[in-house]
Image (cartoon, coloured by chain):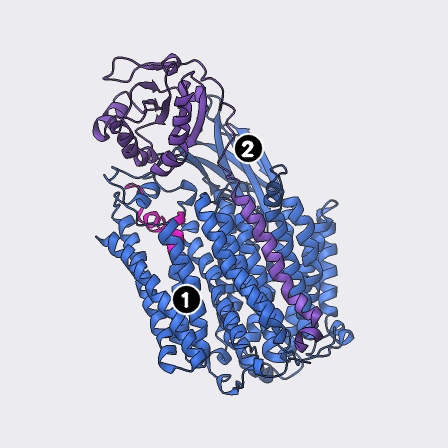
Chain colours: A blue, B purple
Amino acid sequence: MIVEAGHFALVLALCVAFVQGVLPIVGAARGNAAWMAVAPQAAIAQWLLVAVAFLALMHAYVTSDFSVLNVVLNSHTDKPLLYKISGVWGNHEGSMLLWVLILSLFGAAVALFGGNLPAAFRARVLSVHAWLAIGFYLFILLTSNPFERMLPPAENGQDLNPLLQDPGLAFHPPMLYLGYVGFSMAFSFAVAALIEGRVDASWARWVRPWTLLAWCCLTAGIALGSWWAYYELGWGGWWYWDPVENASFMPWLAGTALLHSATMVEKRDTLKGWTVFLAIVAFSLSLLGTFLVRSGVLTSVHAFATDPARGVFILLLLVFVIGGSLALFAWRGPTLRNTGLFQPISREGAMLLNNLAMMTGAAAVLLGTLYPLFLDAVGGAKVSVGPPFFNATFVPLMIPMIAAMAVGPLLAWKRGDLAAAMKRLWVAAAAAAMVALFIWQMQGDGAIFGALGIGLATWLLVGVLVEWGERIRLFRAPAGEAIGRLVRTPRASLGMTFAHAGLAIAIAGIAASTAWKVESIQTMKPGDTVDVAGYAYTFQGARRADGPNYTAVRGTFTVRKDDRPFATLEPEKRIYAVRSQPTTEAAIRTTFLGDLYAVIGDPEGTEGAFVTRIYFNPLVAWIWAGAMLMAAGGLLSLSDRRYRVGLAAGRRRDAPADASPTRA
Amino acid sequence: MSAAVSFPMKRFLFLLPLALFLVIAGYFAMGLTRDPRVLPSVLINTPVPEFALPSIQGRDRGFASTDLQGGVALVNVFGSWCVACRVEHGFLMQLKQRGEIPIHGIDWREPDREAGPRWLAKYGDPYALIGDDPESRGVIAFGVTGAPETFLVDRQGVIRHKHVGPLTPEVWDRTLKPLIAELRKQ
């Protein structure tokens, strides 16, 4: 009964979405306030209904209701409660339900907290948002119904893919979806603005918090996903340029570009068409990510669904959403007028450089991800594009952008003074050169790229600190004044300092872990010792260590450094009973300068020997620390008071822009 | 009109993303026609390799390649451990009751001798002949990649069609039924 109630709630949500998709937007066109007022209530109703549907499915999982096909295919009575719950979104149907739950959550958030938006604009935004929801409700109800019954019921389930039975992955999809789906809000704002025909400073100020929220979640989600790949896949790597990783990375690049260009619309009344375009692209890439993962067009480790019928539906959805919005953009976009002019050397110029690098990078990743598909479609061979392509295209694009990132915030709006900015950055240049030279000397030959990478990270970090010091007049004004300035610094600019510093730290981690990773694969008998990066690992043997739904072998390594005990590492190799699928659980000890990382493989011979893989990954934890700092910077910026106070609402012009001449 | 004329370049720039997207969508549409799961089976249109499987508990004869001579038949790979087999089982029972075509079963990789017969006793037995295949001998002869899989074999014992995944009424109506009618005419 509860399951049918959930199914019915989802059908009702679809009906409510139809009402929300039609009445408010027609009301906005006719100036009918009562029709417009339907939008917020409908958005909240949708959210409540989807929440009922989601909880119904979760109930079926928690109580192990094996009359539900979805539960049979993805759960098991022996599974720990956490994974019964995360199993809800660990499969295609349930993850789509999570998708619409978050979509409706954002709609409800605009209904509840969007009080500073003009009524007609909010009505249009929520109507556009409802049409996105309609597409996804239909997709779930027609092709991916998680509430399908199986009669007679099964005795037990098939269990969740063991790779997904992990705390990191339990929280990774909701985080990632908050990011993906969060861009739907920027999309709805962009389309509503195109319908109204006006984009101005207040529009940018409304879009920015929603984009920031999505961006923070996506940043954290990608970091969590890469952390999971790092410790669960057992190869010591943290990024594989897998299609699913790329699918989350492309919207991140577009979203980062959007954050910066929205600032320019807000402060300088320029790049409006481009900003609207980025808002459409960020969400389109999120949708494309869904398509790539779920249609079976590209399959990979993560893909939970391969079904052409779904693929056709998603393709239609993509054409409707992306094609429709881009057509609207082609029609209304040219009427947007930019008034702010600027020189190439200016803060706008630096942000434009950021935008170009981000979008070219996203295009390179898109090309690398889709190229195998294109080749297959024209009858060529089945190929896969590997990390070398991405490293050769993406990395060189990012280097000039990161170099310019230290300079940009020091330039003035409109027309900047490059010489003056460089003069203030001499500390950063000196620090970067010193650090790079020092590391190059320490590590000897062969690691010049690592040294340059760390140098670049130092340049950016010191540059960010210089800009921050300038802002609060550190060392130039009396301490009291500096503290006063620090306290009064707008949180948005403090957020930028955090985010840029976070990127610098992440780059250092990426450069070091790529350049100086140490890997050692060998067979070890109990008592054998192997030396990896100055740490002596002694294998103490392996024993059985079974869990609730798996059998496991747990190896023990004692690690000594400089002949003193340093750590004990206990990696496991698990075999999950129901699917008889093995997983590795790497043992990791994180230190400031690097991770000790041990994996146990298959037994070898009869003397208790095992294949073991031991890695030293320098500075690898800095990558995730940096990403968390970036997300924290985003949240800090989100709490800036200018987004909370509806300052902008009153300043909005009342005449629609499409009534004014479009000639410049 | 005048706006469009004074900004032909601008119009073009704003149209560019749409054009690019339509090209990508076109490729997606082409990509969708290529199902990554359709593995070209080298065995299609070749005779079933020789095999002879013992009977399962409670039956007096097994299933061998010689049983496939003389009539069009389906060969279905199943196992009591396979949940997707449960999904198609009801439809196989219908096919049997309607007397559409003889269905032979290969009972694959049972954990013990009782598991298969117990499963059939519980959900019904649609099979004419069943071979027990704990060591995957018969399954290898057919080039099976997973359960359930269903093969259509003509009266000369030549494999004519392979279906991967649960057999559904749609697959039956759209693919198998016409193909069977055609094979019976020959």
Secondary structure under tag 2 reads strand
Check disc 2 and give the amino acid type. Answer: Thr
The residue nearer to you, when weighing A145 against A553, is: A145
Q: Is residue A299 above or below residue B38?
A: below
Q: Is residue A88 magenta?
A: yes
Q: Is residue B91 above or below residue A482?
A: above
Secondary structure under tag 1 reads helix
Which disc, if any, is residue A130?
Answer: 1
Q: Which residue reaches farthest front? A: B185
Asked if the residue at tag 1 contacts the one at tag 2, i.e. Cβ–Cβ closer than 8 Å, the answer is no
Q: Is residue A515 magenta?
A: no
Check disc 1 and give the amino acid type. Answer: Ala
Within-10-Å neighbours for mark 1: few <14, some 14–19, many 20+: many
Are the residues under marks 2 and 1 on the same chain? yes
Query: At 60% across and 71% down in the image, what residue appears?
Result: A333
Q: Which residue reaches farthest right? A: A419
Q: Specify the subunit that label 2 lies on.
A: A
Q: Is residue A478 left or right of residue B41?
A: right
Q: CA distance from mark 2 to mark 1?
A: 62 Å
Query: At 52% across and 46% down in the image, what residue appears?
Result: A230
What segment is highlighted magenta in the picture?
Answer: A76-98
Query: At 31% across and 59% down in the image, what residue appears?
Result: A11
Is residue A304 visible to us here?
no
Q: Which residue is mark 2?
A: A529
